[in-house]
Image (cartoon, rainbow, N blue to C red):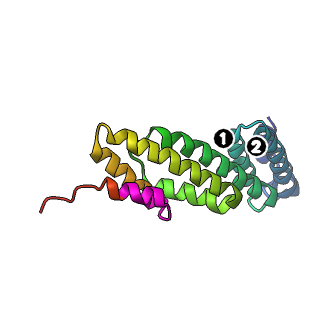
Amino acid sequence: QAQQTFDQLKTELAEDDVYITTTAPRMLADTYASMAESRGESGEYETALQLTDAGLALNPRDATLQGLRSDFLVEVNIIELDQLFQITSAFDIDDISRKVREIENGAPAKYTEFRSRSEGALSERINFLAQTSEKEAAGLADAAFRVFPTSNILENLAREYQLEPWPA
């Protein structure tokens, strides 16, 4: 509702009005930060991330919102990838690599545990797929090793289940 009031004021006040250009955007951004923190504390990371984005749209240089966004992005990525790695047979390597880097750079302390869980989930999934389709297992093993190139577990699975070369 505050956003609606702000939008209405923008139509009624001069474009260069200090309240419209400076005061109100900062106040609204602070409100978005508070709401995002509350949502984050209750584990609603996706909503918290959306709230930080809304606040940053109003005040892009707000360090508090930038930090919250980074924290919530890490949590959203961890939850998404934890779920994906248990059920996938293929994934977009570039997209998943980006999310893994966001976790690694945004929360190095959480990354080690995340990586260990990911290796376990992916190796279980690869071995499960191998029971019915070594080709699918090979594709997932190759993709997983490309995302986690320092993983001995995934390297061994990528060697064990190699993709067939293209016919000449």
Residue at x-position 54% and y-position 49%: 118
Task: Give the magenta part as a residue range.
Answer: 145-158
Secondary structure of residue under mark 1:
helix
Q: In percent of the image, x 81 and y 56: which residue is there?
A: 64
Query: Where is residue 31, by image quadrant?
Result: top right
Dividing the picture into quadrants, the one containing residue 12 is top right
- The residue identified by callout 2 is 7
Whether label 2 touches label 1, CB < 8 Å: no
Q: What residue do we see at 87% from left, 58% from top?
A: 18
Q: In which quadrant is the N terminus drawn? A: top right
Q: Position of residue 162 (x, y in %)?
A: 29, 56
Which amino acid, mark 1?
Glu
Q: Tell me, yes or no, if residue 165 can be seen here.
A: yes
Where does the image place residue 134, in percent across and percent down from the top left?
28, 45
Q: Residue 125: image x %, image y %? A: 43, 42
Q: Is residue 114 left or right of residue 128?
A: right
Q: Tell me: residue 59, above or below residue 84.
A: below
Magenta segment includes 120 = no
Residues 89 and 57: in front is: 89
Numbered tag placed on residue 46 in the rendering: 1
